[in-house]
């Protein structure tokens, strides 16, 4: 496909990404000027770049505008309950370790209702990728306050301006122990694609924040202009600094949007730790009954003694 | 690892441990849970057993995550289970609804305690029976099994997995703290003697498969993640492709089937133990631990000359409506002892209608019925007939 020029692709296919999009579900429900189109495109390109098989990739979403991503990608796709995409994905990944499991959801889904799951999955270093599209607001329900809404910004539940401190998403992910933490805006299509490809191949909990324009709700309430205006603003406000401390780069209304790959660590995943723990025990005891009888739990011993007298 | 670590033989075993062993025997290889009295022993046992069988044990951050996690594991084609008590079920209910809507096989063990709220953590009750039927919002068919001994806790765990695999839904195993913490003889048969049912996988080609296409039995064929089917599934009302469809027509096809797939198979699902039903004037309808206080009470009432039958609901949901309707025609009434203030009694009363009297023997939990209390109600019902 790389050798074909665009005209040939267009002649043969409905869409250059027909292989991964559910074309029978188009048109999608997202507004014009929304950043989700770019987020999905970069994700598809990132998977291709990493050489990950579509058949072995599962995508899990929660609820909200970004929650609809799962439904438009022709992968094994799961549209779950609000905030619970990460524990669902954890179960899926641990039960079939051959899969590449990606959670694609929004800032409200992953950091408000699902915040606890995110920090614990990062702590465990479960081998999943979490892509969080941050548009600073609840779009699908009509523009309510999000855990990312900047101080002073207007939303439909903050008519006098937001008075809550927002979360700095990359800071939370890094502090919770994620193995890979990056932030890009939808302006950084090429760098974002590279990050998605890098995360797809990387072991451990990978977190990518995509700062994305919401022209219909957030921009309208805060006089941000059209989707294009917002992209231009991202362009002028963003600074790439891979060495930045992720906990010190919050997003406010008018400050620099510091982008980059802030964390890229190699550390054992949840499953590797499980395997290491079992291996040391298995090497110590020749069979499981012996292992069990050496367990500190008294009721295991009782059972063992009883069975030993019965079965031997 | 130690692949031959499945137990068989006779054991002196706690109910919760028997449940975990039943799950291992049924082929459960994923357990996601959160500690809660009186169900923690199940998690502890699974933490010991599963890693050595190439299975996965994960202690999640809460019950919400545990329920979401076992659904995810089930979609990878692995039999999965969680175990909790009333407060945990309250947290799980949203994702139980997701499991019902996505038609995900898994088992949810509820070792019931005294409720509401935190209630009686270390004592027993049967206060979540209606929650097991109507806990998550909306209409769906539900299967709930009630063991009354550690042996039955083992057996019914396997049955619960079989039903969940066959009918594709989360199945409730409604034990209580007494059955869970009781230690009795448990016989575990060799693996080859167990009846294990596995879900029906599709044999269609990847381009022909529709995840929610169903046949006469109303149950769609399963495809697991990573097999190349690349299907979509959602908690939204969906068509046969699994795609969201917000029309009345789609809702009307999607939701009634969730109820009917259980209703039409009630003969297979409904498990009932009965004694001396023929010619009885009064029938004691009990389930779970209450059945063990009902039996001596029945013997005492018989000595007083009352003809009493014993009907034990092993399957409480789906409720055996036809069975109760038929029996109601020939008896004076039903007596329903339960460790709540009248939940299953409501169902018995609904089915008995005006044909027979229904009296609950309520108990708030934190103890078990006194035999005399049950006998007294049996007498009241029996004498009600002579009036």
Image (tube, grey):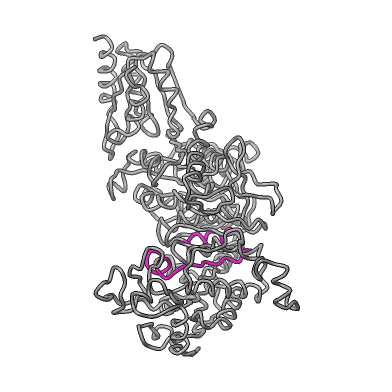
Query: In front: B154, or A12?
Result: A12
- Magenta stretch? A85-114
Q: Quadrant of residue A163?
A: bottom left
Q: Residue at x 40, y 59 (%)?
A: B62
Query: In front: A211, or A97?
Result: A211
Q: Residue at x 62, y 75 (%)?
A: A45
Q: Residue at x 42, y 16 (%)?
A: B277
Judge left or right: residue A224 versus residue B240.
left
Query: In front: B150, or B81?
Result: B81
Q: Main secondary structure of the magenta part?
A: helix
Farthest right residue?
A3
- Quarter of the image that includes the N terminus of chain A: bottom right
Does residue B34 sit above or below B380 in this rendering?
A: below
Q: How many marks?
A: 0
* Residue B124 coordinates in the image, percent (x, y): 32, 41
Judge left or right: residue B83 versus residue A293.
left
* Magenta stretch: includes residue B90: no
Judge left or right: residue A198 versus residue B366.
right
* Magenta stretch: includes residue A109: yes
Does residue B130 sit above or below B348 in this rendering?
A: below
Q: Residue at x 43, y 16 (%)?
A: B276
Quick check: can you spot residue A310? no
* Residue B216 coordinates in the image, percent (x, y): 61, 35
Farthest top residue?
B386
- Quarter of the image that includes the C terminus of chain A: top right
* Residue B162 coordinates in the image, percent (x, y): 56, 40
Does residue A201 sit above or below A243 in this rendering?
A: above
Q: Quadrant of residue A160?
A: bottom left
Query: In front: B222, or B60?
Result: B222
Judge left or right: residue A125 versus residue B194.
left
């Amino acid at each position: 496909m790389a050798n074909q020029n665009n005209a040939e692709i267009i002649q043969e296919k409905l869409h250059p990404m027909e292989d991964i999009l559910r074309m029978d579900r188009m048109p999608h429900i997202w507004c014009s000027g929304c950043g989700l189109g770019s987020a999905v495109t970069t994700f598809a390109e990132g998977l291709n770049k990493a050489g990950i098989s579509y058949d072995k990739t599962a995508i899990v979403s929660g609820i909200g505008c970004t929650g609809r991503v799962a439904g438009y990608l022709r992968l094994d796709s799961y549209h779950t309950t609000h905030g619970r995409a990460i524990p669902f994905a954890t179960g899926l990944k641990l039960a079939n370790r051959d899969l590449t499991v990606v959670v694609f959801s929004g800032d409200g889904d992953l950091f408000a209702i699902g915040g606890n799951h995110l920090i614990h999955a990062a702590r465990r270093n479960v081998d999943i990728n979490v892509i969080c599209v941050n548009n600073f607001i609840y779009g699908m329900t009509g523009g309510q306050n999000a855990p990312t809404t900047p101080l002073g910004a207007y939303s439909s539940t903050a008519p006098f301006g937001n008075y809550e401190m927002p979360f700095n998403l990359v800071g939370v992910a890094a502090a919770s122990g994620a193995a890979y933490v990056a932030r890009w805006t939808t302006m950084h299509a090429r760098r974002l694609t590279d990050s998605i490809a890098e995360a797809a191949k990387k072991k451990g909990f990978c977190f990518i924040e995509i700062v994305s324009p919401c022209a219909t709700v957030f921009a309208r309430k805060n006089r941000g202009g059209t989707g294009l205006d917002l992209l231009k603003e991202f362009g002028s406000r963003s600074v790439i600094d891979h060495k930045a401390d992720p906990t010190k780069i919050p997003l406010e209304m008018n400050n620099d949007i510091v982008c980059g790959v802030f964390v890229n660590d190699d550390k054992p995943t949840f499953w590797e730790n499980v395997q290491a723990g079992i291996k040391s025990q298995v090497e110590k005891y020749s069979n499981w009954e012996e292992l069990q009888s050496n367990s500190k739990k008294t009721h295991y011993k009782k059972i063992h003694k009883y069975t030993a007298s019965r079965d031997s | 690892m130690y692949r031959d670590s499945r137990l068989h033989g006779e054991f002196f075993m706690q109910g919760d441990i028997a449940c975990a062993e039943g799950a291992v025997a049924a082929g459960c290889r994923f357990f996601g849970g959160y500690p809660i009295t009186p169900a923690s022993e199940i998690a502890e046992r699974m933490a010991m057993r599963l890693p050595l069988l190439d299975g996965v044990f994960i202690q999640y951050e809460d019950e919400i995550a545990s329920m979401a996690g076992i659904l995810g594991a089930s979609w990878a084609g692995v039999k999965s289970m969680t175990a909790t008590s009333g407060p945990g079920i309250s947290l799980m209910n949203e994702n139980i609804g997701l499991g019902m809507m996505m038609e995900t096989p898994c088992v949810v063990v509820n070792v019931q305690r005294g409720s509401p709220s935190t209630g009686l953590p270390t004592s027993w009750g049967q206060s979540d029976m209606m929650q097991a039927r109507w806990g998550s919002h909306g209409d769906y068919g539900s299967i709930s099994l009630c063991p009354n001994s550690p042996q039955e806790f083992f057996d019914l765990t396997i049955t619960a997995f079989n039903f969940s695999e066959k009918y594709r839904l989360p199945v409730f195993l409604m034990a209580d703290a007494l059955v869970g913490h009781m230690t009795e003889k448990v016989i575990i048969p060799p693996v080859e003697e167990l009846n294990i049912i596995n879900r029906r996988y599709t044999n269609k080609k990847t381009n022909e498969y529709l995840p929610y296409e169903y046949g006469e039995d109303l149950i769609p064929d399963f495809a697991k993640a990573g097999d190349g089917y690349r299907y979509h599934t959602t908690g939204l009302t969906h068509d046969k492709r699994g795609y969201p469809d917000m029309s009345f027509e789609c809702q009307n096809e999607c939701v009634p089937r969730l109820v009917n797939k259980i209703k039409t198979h009630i003969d297979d699902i409904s498990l009932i133990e009965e004694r001396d039903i023929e010619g009885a004037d009064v029938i004691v309808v009990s389930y779970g631990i209450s059945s063990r206080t009902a039996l001596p009470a029945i013997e005492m009432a018989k000595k007083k000359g009352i003809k009493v039958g014993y009907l034990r609901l092993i399957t409480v949901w789906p409720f055996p409506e036809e069975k109760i309707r038929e029996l109601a025609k020939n008896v004076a009434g039903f007596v329903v002892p339960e460790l709540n203030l009248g939940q299953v009694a409501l169902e018995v009363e609904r089915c008995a209608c005006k044909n027979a009297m229904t009296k609950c023997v309520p108990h708030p939990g934190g103890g078990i019925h006194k035999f005399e209390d049950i006998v007294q109600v049996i007498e009241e019902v029996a004498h009600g007939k002579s009036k």
